[in-house]
Amino acid sequence: MRIIARFEKGGHARFLSHLDVLRMFHRAFRRAGIPISYSEGFNPHPLLSFAAALAVGYTSESEWLDAKLERDIEISEFMRSLNDSLPCGFRLTQCFAAEERLPSLTKLMCAAEYIISLSYNEREFPSKLETAAEKLMSNNIFVKKRSKSGFKIVDIRPLVYDIHVETLGEGEIALSVTGCLNSSESLNIGLLLDSLFQIAGKPETVFVHRRRIYSDDGTILPKFGG
């Protein structure tokens, strides 16, 4: 049986790396008594994967896992048992029984939406941030990116689909960013924020939250632009 589930990652769990999260779910499945299938060969591994790694320090309400089980289980029982076995900061919010022929989550996803909460003291910061966003959306965004062969200069503007600035109250701003996220290339939110802050100046605090992961056709994942 194949199950795809959406889960939240928050609180102190945001400081766990992607590898830490993978190991944590392995332990949670064992505690819940839910048997995961293993790959064949000399080095078998659990058939458990995720849509996209989340940077350390970020929170999310839209992380996705894909698990192949050794036996069938009721979706409600799967969700209850695994939630009871997950540590603080993690919670399943949706589960689906998926067909075996369905592509992997990494092949389905195409974009992601982030909400970046900013606090500031400088009175002019909101207008400076809006100006910076408009400037970046109408020009190339050249950044220094690390690669296997060292650092190189790349233009990340094609990966940025939308930037929206909203003032929430005195000293608080919500920055909504939608960008590319697929198996071959993805928008690095940290590099985009660095480019914005080079123009607008740095805020007091920055808190990044992934709100959604999208697919092209709306299969399992929400449809991009739908």
Image (spheres, grey):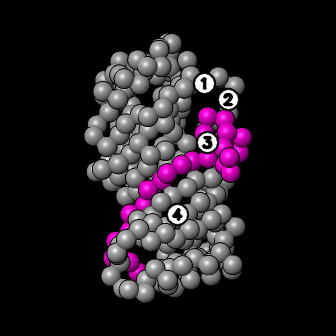
Q: Measuring 50% from the left and 12% from the top, which residue is drawn there?
A: 71
Q: Nearer the viewer, residue 30 or 108?
A: 108
Amino acid carrying mark 2 in the image: Leu
Q: Are marks 3 and 1 in contact (CB under 8 Å)?
A: no
Q: Mark 2 points at which residue?
A: 102
Q: Measuring 57% from the left and 76% from the top, which residue is drawn there?
A: 133
Q: Do the residues labelled 2 and 1 touch (CB within 8 Å)?
A: yes
Q: Do the residues labelled 1 and 4 touch (CB within 8 Å)?
A: no
Q: Measuring 50% from the left and 28% from the top, which residue is drawn there?
A: 95
The magenta-colored residue range is 202-226
Q: Looking at the picture, does residue 57 appear above or below residue 158?
A: above
Q: Looking at the picture, does residue 162 appear above or below residue 222?
A: below
Q: Distance between the residues labelled 3 and 2?
A: 15 Å
Residue 9 in picture, x, y percent from top left: 38, 45
Q: Name the residue under label 3.
A: 222
- Regarding residue 121, the answer to whether it shows in the image is yes
Let me know if residue 205 is in the magenta part: yes
Q: Mark 4 points at which residue?
A: 176
- Sequence order check, earlier mark of 3 and 2: 2
- Nearer to us of marks 2 and 4 is 4
Q: Distance between the residues labelled 2 and 1?
A: 7 Å
Q: Distance between the residues labelled 2 and 4?
A: 30 Å
Residue 75 in picture, x, y percent from top left: 47, 19
Q: Mark 1 points at which residue?
A: 98
- Sequence order check, earlier mark of 3 and 1: 1
